[in-house]
Image (cartoon, helix red, strand yellow):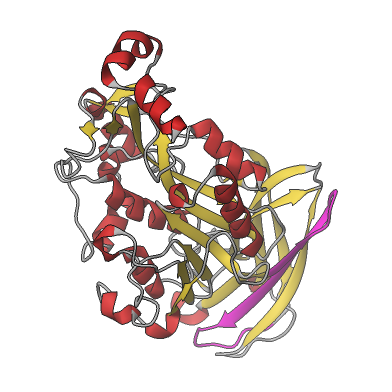
Amino acid sequence: MLRDRLNHLLFSNLFYKAFIRPFDRILYAIVTMESLRKERRHNPVPLNKIPQVSDLENSEWRAVLDEMAPLFTMDSESFHRKHWEFVQLVYMLARDRRLHPQAACLAVGAGREPVVYYLTHKVRRVTGIDLYAGTYLGGEDEPDIPDHPAKYAPFVCPQKSLDLQRMDARNLNFKDHSFDFVFSASSIEHFGNINEIRRSLREMYRVLKPGGAAAITTEVRLNRLGRSIPNTRIFSLDDLLRLCRGVGFTLDSDSMDMRLEAPFHQDPIKLPEQVLRRPHVILRYFSTWFTSVSLLLCKPGSGALRGEWRTGIDITPLEYNARIQVGTQASILPRGGKLRLHMELENTGNFDWYSGGGSHRIAVGVQLRDRNDGLIERDFHQFTIPRNLPRGDSLAFEGSVPLALAPGNYRLWVTLKREFITWFPESACPPARVDFTVE
């Protein structure tokens, strides 16, 4: 109570304007919308960032929005940072190749968010947890949601792929290493004090598989000083990153796009009286300027390479079509050694394959990078198909790739080709990827 009174006194408009505002400032660079639009047309939208209306100019990001259009629509005039958060979550997970039919994911603070239902069409299973106490306006956590999820579904979704449970994010009742990825939209800021938020992040880290990821959106402060907001923690970027790294997470990329678009910084939405105003990008509560932020966090580890069945493009595709899977397992020896890849190959063509011929070798292309995607080593290695492969048959085989690694954090890209055939284009055979750490 005393803290709230002092906070109100220090950051009341008159006192703030006279004594504090001259020493306070927006912390991040301001760019014109036109320059950012040009950048977005030619470059991917970063994963770790604040909302920018210019994200709409990026074709890949826009494709995610268009696919989610039954849930909501956005243009430059109707832009809303909360809708941006939902699209950005899916975009991050898709671009990081986390969405595949074998994935199991956990939604923390799930409520009845549209992304929870949307992802039931993208992954094997979506588990969502929330208190479901009926305390939030708008019916976001109605008590009957876990028992009747279809009642709140914005569209038809496979119910067998969805499991909503009443659970506290600070004490997740799941075994260690249960999920391929975790996501949480605008939730952790409501989990209590800083220690309780840390507990929830530690729980997310615990239930993730090695090499898994947590996609998070929350609130971030844009100026140094300001008044606290009731029941909501507005993080400084430094505090937020310190929290995440403190429980073991690493950023998927160390780069953060915190640039503010002009002219939104000049006329922020004043809370609470302008809460319905659009475009909804930057907000101001008394002296506190804030917006949303997205983070893609990784749990280090040498978990399985994420891979799906890929269709290979051959020079005689009617005769020699193949589907190749990389990534059911991968093991990396500490302090160097060899990477052992477990691969599967299926003959989907019209002719039998015979081992021993040059056209029946597989080349595995390897790119070893640091966590900022800086290239360390690039090579490819040949493996002969170990036996004949009749039409419609499949086989599993292994191969080792020598790697000399100093201790550190790494990223491995793997792609495939049939020997003597040009590399498959990425659209046909996108690379599998794994993040790992050598102790």
Tell which of 124 and 273 is nearer to you. Answer: 273
Is 341 contained in the magenta span? yes
In this orientation, does residue 254 appear? no
Is 216 contained in the magenta span? no
Residue 77 place in picture, x, y as percent: 14, 42
Kindly identify the residue that appears in the image at 64 percent across and 86 percent down. Answer: 389
Horizontally, is 201 left or right of 270 in the view?
Answer: right
Query: Which corner quadrant of the image does residue 173 belong to?
Result: bottom right
- Above or below, 420 against 413 in this view is below
Kindly identify the residue that appears in the image at 49 percent across and 81 percent down. Answer: 319
- Above or below, 73 against 277 in this view is below
Horizontally, is 139 left or right of 220 in the view?
Answer: left
- Above or below, 381 against 20 in this view is below
Tell which of 228 and 362 is nearer to you. Answer: 228
Query: Which corner quadrant of the image does residue 70 belong to?
Result: bottom left
Residue 418 place in picture, x, y as percent: 60, 67
- Above or below, 124 against 424 in this view is below
Kindly identify the residue that appears in the image at 70 percent across and 52 percent down. Answer: 436
In this orientation, does residue 394 appear? yes
In the rendered picture of this protein, how many numbered marks are placed on residues?
A: 0
Quarter of the figure with the N terminus: top left
Residue 205 place in picture, x, y as percent: 63, 56
Residue 421 place in picture, x, y as percent: 56, 63
The extreme front residue here reads 2
The magenta stretch is: 329-354
Kindly identify the residue that appears in the image at 33 percent across and 50 percent down. Answer: 61
Tell which of 110 and 193 is nearer to you. Answer: 193
